[in-house]
């Protein structure tokens, strides 16, 4: 059996798409067995300009072959991303030309990876299994501010989405908040395999076995460190919350932002405008170094912009942060807010971009460390991938 596995991001890149798909592809190759071939078509590491790492253009691991497409140099702007994906799309079609597959698996936060899967599956009249990590059309409707551009682009995106989803045999939704949006695609079967916690976080988090699960901490320390690590994009909206909160909180709290992205300039400009000095911005780091940074922190931070589309999503960052015994500060709405209330303890929750709510709760917070062992067991990436791989193989 031949499986085509499409993911724009893959190891050793640093992003949620890579962290999700690299271990899932390996689990799939393991369950499929030596008689099957898993062909991964992805891109060379490109998520951040400030994080460079080498990777082979073609790599074989057992019954899995990975093709990494070299993309043109680009930043995080929309036009650069369009150009990059055009390159990925055209090169992927060349790699897969004249090859026969039994199933196409496409993991997509941007719609066009799913569409690429549709084009290949439809041409070969084979099964299409989609893994949907974001409702791209919904997000673009919020992001596009130019009315003329929106008038031109949105009908095209909706057509592409409709064709793609209407052909799929199976659609996995990473967030149950997506359910209502997909009711019109009744030809497909659905699953809800979320993101999960990688072994690197499960195995390397520093814990004190003999201590109780909840530990009250000394609140008299001079400075508390609040750490955010990840993409600094419009979607995260950090420029709408961190500078303003840091200005209100003063030197009792220090924000540390680790990452890069298209809205980094907006964040830096806002910090200058407000004369904020208690925020430090660091370039992306390896996951090993990130573990150390998280353990050095007092609070871990998560935030999404106040877009309507984001009320449906479930950020992968939740699973990463919840492996630490640190309190989490989370500015999320909709389904993500509900999920955290029901599943994650020791959280300061507030609506996206609500500076006053965040500051008020943080200043009144009685600081504790609390392990989340039940959450970690339930959302182990290994367990989720095992079940999801079985779900894929059923279609062979």
Image (cartoon, helix red, strand yellow):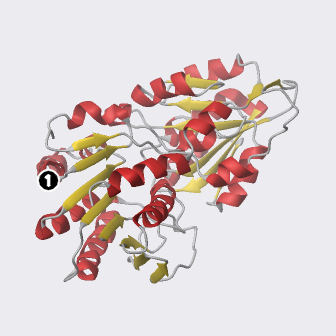
**Residue 82 sits in which quadrant?**
bottom left
- Asked if residue 103 can be seen in this view, the reply is yes
Residue at the spot 24% in from the left edge and 45% down from the top edge: 137
Number of numbered discs visible in the structure rendering: 1
48 vs 250, left or right, is: left
Q: Nearer the viewer, residue 3 or 136?
A: 3
Q: Position of residue 30 (x, y in %)?
A: 47, 65
Quadrant, the N terminus: bottom left
171 vs 330, left or right, is: left
Quadrant, the C terminus: bottom left
Q: Position of residue 272 (x, y in %)?
A: 60, 46
Q: Secondary structure at mark 1?
A: helix
Residue at the spot 88% in from the left edge and 33% down from the top edge: 210
**Residue 392, above or below 173:** below
Residue at the spot 50% in from the left edge and 36% down from the top edge: 240
- Asked if residue 280 can be seen in this view, the reply is no
Q: Which residue is mark 1?
A: 167
256 vs 43, left or right, is: right
Q: Nearer the viewer, residue 215 or 366?
A: 215
Residue at the spot 42% in from the left edge and 61% down from the top edge: 76
Q: Position of residue 91 (x, y in %)?
A: 28, 79
Q: Residues within 10 Å of mark 1 (few under 14, many from 20)?
A: some
**Residue 127 sits in which quadrant?**
bottom left
Q: Position of residue 223 (x, y in %)?
A: 81, 34
**Residue 160 sits in which quadrant?**
bottom left
**Residue 385, above or below 183:** below
Q: Nearer the viewer, residue 214 or 309?
A: 214
């Amino acid at each position: 059996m031949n499986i085509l596995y499409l993911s724009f991001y893959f190891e050793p890149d640093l992003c949620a798409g890579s962290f999700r798909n690299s271990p899932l592809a390996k689990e799939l190759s393991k369950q499929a067995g030596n008689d099957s071939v898993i062909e991964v078509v992805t891109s060379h590491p490109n998520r951040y300009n400030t994080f460079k790492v080498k990777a082979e253009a073609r790599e074989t691991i057992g019954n899995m072959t990975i093709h990494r497409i070299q993309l043109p140099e680009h930043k995080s702007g929309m036009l650069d991303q369009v150009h990059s994906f055009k390159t990925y799309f055209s090169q992927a079609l060349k790699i897969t030309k004249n090859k026969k597959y039994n199933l196409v698996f496409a993991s997509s936060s941007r719609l066009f990876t799913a569409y690429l899967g549709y084009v290949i599956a439809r041409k070969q009249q084979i099964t299409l299994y989609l893994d949907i990590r974001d409702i791209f059309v919904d997000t673009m409707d919020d992001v596009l501010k130019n009315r003329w551009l929106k008038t031109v682009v949105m009908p095209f995106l909706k057509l592409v989405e409709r064709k793609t989803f209407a052909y799929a045999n199976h659609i996995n939704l990473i967030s149950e908040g997506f359910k209502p949006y997909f009711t019109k695609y009744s030809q497909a079967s659905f699953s809800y395999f979320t993101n999960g916690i990688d072994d690197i976080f499960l195995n390397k988090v520093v814990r004190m076995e003999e201590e109780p699960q909840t530990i009250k901490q000394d609140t008299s320390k001079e400075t508390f460190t609040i750490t955010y690590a990840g993409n600094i994009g419009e979607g995260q909206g950090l420029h709408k919350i961190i500078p303003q909160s840091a200005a209100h909180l003063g030197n009792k709290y220090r924000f540390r932002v680790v990452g890069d992205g298209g809205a980094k300039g907006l964040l830096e400009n806002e910090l200058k405008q407000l004369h904020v000095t208690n925020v430090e911005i660091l370039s992306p780091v390896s996951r090993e170094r990130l573990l150390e940074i998280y353990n050095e922190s007092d609070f871990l931070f998560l935030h999404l912009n106040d877009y309507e589309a984001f009320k449906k999503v479930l950020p992968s960052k939740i699973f990463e942060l919840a492996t630490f015994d640190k309190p989490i500060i989370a500015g999320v709405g909709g389904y993500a807010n509900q999920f955290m209330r029901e599943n994650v303890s020791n959280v300061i929750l507030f609506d996206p971009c609500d500076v006053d709510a965040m500051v008020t709760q943080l200043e009144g917070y009685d600081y504790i460390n609390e392990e989340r062992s039940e959450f970690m067991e339930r959302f182990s990436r290994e367990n989720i991938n095992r079940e999801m791989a079985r779900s894929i193989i059923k279609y062979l």
